Image (cartoon, rainbow, N blue to C red):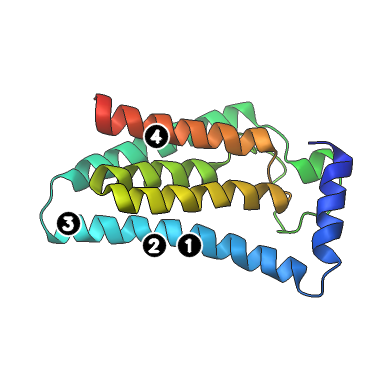
C-alpha cells in the first residue's frame, strides 16, 4: 500500500470519537483469543495425557524461532517508519515487519487447533484472518507482511502436523 492509503486509513479511524480505541481493543481481543486458545489447547491435552501436546509445542516453537530469525535477517521496515505517519496502534519497533509474527503465530496456532478439532481450527483460522486485516488497518504491517506470515504459519502447520 502507498503512503497516502495508510494516511487515509489512519485519518478515517481517528475522525470518529472512539475510532482509535476500537481498533486498539479489537486488535488486542483478536490477538488474545488466539493466544488463550493455544494455552487452553495445551492444558487440555496435557491434562488428558494426549501425546499430541508434544507435537504442537515442537511445531509451534521451532517454527516461531525460525520465523523470528528470518525477520531479524530481513529486517524490513514498518509502514509507519517508511512513510513517516503515526500508526493507530503505537509500536516502538522500526524494523522486523516481514513476516508479521503475530499473524504467523495465529495461523500456526490455528493449524494446531485444526489438528485437534476441525471446528475449533476453523474458528481460530477465521480469527487469524481478522488479525491480518487489523494489523494492516493499525498501520503496523504492510499487506505483504501479513500474507507472508499467514502462508508461513499454514505451511508450518501442514508440514508439522500432516507431512512429518
Q: Residue at x 11, y 58 (%)?
A: 48
Q: CA distance from mark 4 to mark 3?
A: 21 Å
Q: Residue at x 86, y 66 (%)?
A: 15
Give the structural element (helix, strand or loop) at label 1.
helix
Q: Mark 1 or mark 3, which is nearer the start of the sequence?
A: 1
How many neighbours does mark 3 have within 10 angstroms: few (below 14), some (14-19), or many (20 or more)? some
How many neighbours does mark 4 have within 10 angstroms: few (below 14), some (14-19), or many (20 or more)? many
Q: Kindly identify which residue carries mark 2.
A: 36
Q: Which mark is residue 109?
A: none
Q: Which mark is residue 32?
A: 1
Q: Report the quarter where the C terminus lies.
A: top left
Q: Kindly identify which residue carries mark 3.
A: 46
Give the structural element (helix, strand or loop) at label 4.
helix
Q: Quadrant of residue 100?
A: top right
Q: Position of residue 29 (x, y in %)?
A: 53, 65
Return the residue found at the far top: 163
Q: Kindly identify which residue carries mark 4.
A: 63
Q: CA distance from mark 3 to mark 1?
A: 21 Å
Task: Please give left or right for residue 61 compared with residue 129 in the image.
Answer: left
Q: Quadrant of residue 36?
A: bottom left
Q: Position of residue 31 (x, y in %)?
A: 51, 58
Task: Please give left or right for residue 69 compared with residue 143 in the image.
Answer: left
**Contact (CB < 8 A) between labels 3 and 1?**
no
Q: Position of residue 37 (x, y in %)?
A: 36, 59
Q: Nearer the viewer, mark 2 or mark 4?
A: 2
Q: Quadrant of residue 26?
A: bottom right
Give the structural element (helix, strand or loop) at label 3.
helix
Asked if residue 85 can be seen in this view, the reply is no
Q: Mark 4 or mark 2, which is nearer the start of the sequence?
A: 2
Q: Position of residue 146 (x, y in %)?
A: 60, 39
Task: Please give left or right for residue 117 compared with residue 9 in the image.
Answer: left
Amino acid at each position: 500500500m502507498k503512503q497516502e492509503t495508510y494516511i487515509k486509513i489512519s485519518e478515517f479511524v481517528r475522525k470518529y470519537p472512539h475510532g482509535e480505541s476500537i481498533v486498539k481493543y479489537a486488535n488486542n481481543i483478536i490477538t488474545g483469543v488466539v493466544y488463550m486458545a493455544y494455552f487452553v489447547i495445551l492444558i487440555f491435552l496435557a491434562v488428558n495425557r494426549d501425546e499430541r501436546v508434544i507435537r504442537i509445542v515442537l511445531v509451534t516453537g521451532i517454527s516461531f524461532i525460525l520465523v523470528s530469525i528470518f525477520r531479524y535477517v530481513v529486517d524490513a521496515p514498518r509502514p509507519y517508519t517508511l512513510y513517516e505517519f503515526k500508526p493507530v496502534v503505537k509500536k516502538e519497533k522500526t524494523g522486523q515487519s516481514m513476516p508479521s509474527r503475530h499473524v504467523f503465530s495465529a495461523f500456526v496456532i490455528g493449524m494446531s487447533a485444526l489438528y485437534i478439532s476441525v471446528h475449533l481450527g476453523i474458528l481460530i483460522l477465521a480469527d487469524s484472518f481478522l488479525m491480518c486485516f487489523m494489523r494492516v488497518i493499525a498501520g503496523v504491517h504492510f499487506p505483504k507482511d501479513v500474507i507472508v506470515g499467514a502462508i508461513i504459519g499454514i505451511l508450518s502447520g501442514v508440514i508439522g502436523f500432516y507431512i512429518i
